[in-house]
Amino acid sequence: MKHTITLIPGDGIGPEVSSAVVKILETAGLDVEWESHLAGVLAVERHGTTLPAELLDSIRRNKVALKGPVTTPVGGGFTSVNVGLRKALDLFANLRPVWNIPSVPSRYEGVDLVIVRENTEDLYAGLEHEVVPGVVESLKIITEEASTRVAKFAFEYARKHGRKRVTAIHKANIMKMGDGLFLKTVKKVGLSYPDILCDDRIVDAVCMHLVMNPTQFDVLVLPNLYGDIVSDLCAGLVGGLGVVPGANLGVEIGVFEAVHGSAPDIAGKGLANPTALLLSALLMLRHIDEGPMADRIMAALGSVLAEDGIRTRDLGGSASTIEYTEAICRRLR
């Protein structure tokens, strides 16, 4: 099947890891036409905006995009490109499966859980203002509509993938109205899925339990801010942000991205690890009904890490980005 996919190479190490993943996908036989577009600081330099209309039109037309990391300035500058994409395209669910990749060192074994994060509201709505000098107010937005659709996504995902439990994460003991609404809504949705256990945990408690025994969890559904924090915590359980995938999904559109940053300090040095973006691309392949190809690439990746012992420096090896990529491609030929 011929696919047309929007490609956002990103900045920093983004172009390097994006190029690596494109090569691996094409070596595996993906019949694809890439529509490449800039976002973030590079787009500002060329188009005067972080999210050019041409980029958004391409994603809306193709319904699927693969995105490398894009720098977000801290404490100033332009707003997050990731947040902007999610809002512009109504990508309401952030999906982050977390599992152990064989032979990748980690603190735990047997981790296999899924983070489903509401993607469009909460404190990430970005509604802030200065009340008086030295006092800033940030508004936390929780709606029944957004909570309902992300809860349905979590339960549908659990049912489709043979998961047994969905756990709502909240701080309703303190934020009784906002987080209370999220919790109440998830429980209400759960009544329509009697085959799946629905329970809940307070966010600080779940962080403690995750670092004590992550294997006790299955699918976690969270409001935006908690989801951002807990998903990175979970990545740390299995080796870090360099070995976990991510996807932003709406009703029709999916944007698949590496969840790590743009690492400008190592950009252009051939040190970048493309594994996270590659795993995100495998989610994308399954999304576009190329599951067998995704399985082949995953097997090749596993062989390179476990049998060939070829890995980038962040995984304890010495291979460059190109050497690592070529090793995976050899396994696919």
Image (spheres, rainbow, N blue to C red):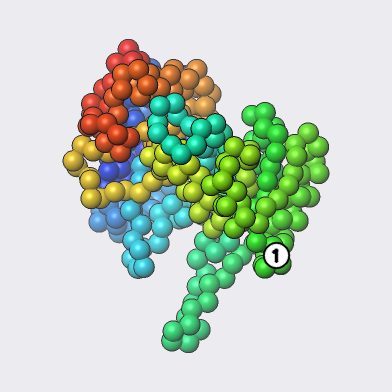
Amino acid marked by disc 1: Asn
| Viewer can see residue 92 | no
Q: Is residue 58 left or right of residue 122?
A: left
| Viewer can see residue 190 | yes
Residue at point 50%, 37% (across, down): 108
- Of 14 and 91, which appears nearest the observer? 14
Residue at point 23%, 29% (across, down): 319
- Give above or below for 158 relative to 43: above
* Residue 247 location (% of width, % of height): 50, 40
* Residue 107 location (% of width, % of height): 46, 39
Residue placed farthest to the bottom in the image? 132
Q: Quadrant of the C terminus?
A: top left
Residue at point 67%, 50% (across, down): 168
Residue placed farthest to the top in the image? 333
- Give above or below for 185 relative to 175: above
Q: Residues within 10 Å of mark 1 (few under 14, many from 20)?
A: few
Circle 1 sits on which residue?
Answer: 173
- Give above or below for 153 relative to 227: above
* Residue 74 location (% of width, % of height): 35, 63
Mark 1, secondary structure of its residue: loop
- Of 256 and 169, which appears nearest the observer? 169
- Of 242 and 314, which appears nearest the observer? 314
Q: Is residue 4 left or right of residue 230?
A: left
Residue at point 33%, 66% (across, down): 77
- Of 329 and 284, which appears nearest the observer? 329
* Residue 136 location (% of width, % of height): 48, 78
